[in-house]
Image (cartoon, helix red, strand yellow):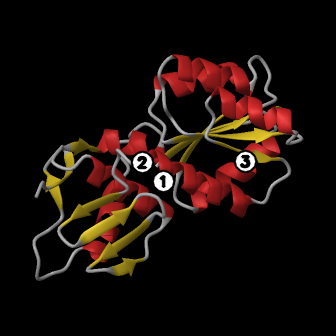
Amino acid sequence: MRILVVEDERKVASFIKRGLEEERYIVETASDGEEGLRLAMENEFDALVLDVMLPKLDGYSIVKALREEGRSTPILMLTARGTMEDRVQGLDLGADDYLAKPFHFEELAARLRSILRRSSTDKTTRLQVGDLELDLVTHFAYREGKEIELTTKEYALLEYLLRNRGRILSRSMIMQHVWKHNFDPESNIIDVYIKRLRQKIERPDQPQIILSIRGVGYRVKEE
Ligand code: CA
């Protein structure tokens, strides 16, 4: 899942980013309100973590602008003092939850899971191919009901492949989505990761899940 963190305090932003990446989210950050709003409008994030006090455009204005545009992306607001007026204002404008600073990372992660779960009544929270299952909220992968241990990147790669089941994904699409930089044709990093992923999720006596498309990239077959 992709999360946008809009926070101008660099230390706090990197603390949140690091924590969320450890929990296998794909995280982008913005350090002022205008950039945050632009990124949120241009991309499909699964949730926003939004500070209230921001340069250029405050968090309330961002929530208001997004909701007026009909964007229902779940939003967790970070309020500075957590006064009642602050909380009420954010929630009234359409934020889904708030957290008062300072906070423990565990609480932020729990609140985020909770708003993701609530928002996903019409979206899927599990992806399944045969007996391989991915829980999109907790970020665990299972085969035949048994957990598979995946690293953050392996998980992000597998989620991207499964979300686009049936589509051929080129190496450069995979690079941009999972690694967030441009594809270097000299590098074999994607193939190395695919190989490791196959060793973890596939069984020698069963059909392959990830198919190689020669000269292009990879595809997960449709059921
Ligand atoms: Ca701030």
x, y (%) of residue 207?
A: 10, 71
Local secondary structure at mark 1: helix
**Image height of 103 relative to 50, above or below:** below
Percent across and percent down for residue 126 are 34, 59
Mark 2 sits on what residue?
120
Asked whether residue 185 appears in the rendered view, the answer is no
Dot 2: few (<14), some (14–19), or many (≥20) neighbours within 10 Å?
some
Where 38 falls versus 7 (above or below)?
above
Q: Nearer the viewer, residue 97 or 151?
A: 97
Q: Disc 1 and disc 2: Cα gap in Å?
A: 5 Å
Label 2 residue SS? loop
Q: Which mark is residue 117?
A: 1
Left or right of 207 in this view: 115: right
Location of mark 3 (residue): 14
For the point 72% across and 27% down, which residue is it? Answer: 59
User: Which amino acid type is shown beneath numbered disc 2?
Assistant: Ser
Tell me if residue 85 comes above or below residue 167 in the rendering.
above
Which kind of residue does numbered mark 1 sit on? Arg
Q: Which sits earlier in the primary sequence, circle 3 or circle 2?
A: 3
The residue at label 3 has a CB less than 8 Å from ligand 1: no
For the C terminus, which image quadrant? bottom left
Instruction: Choose top left, top right, bottom left or bottom right for residue 57.
Output: top right
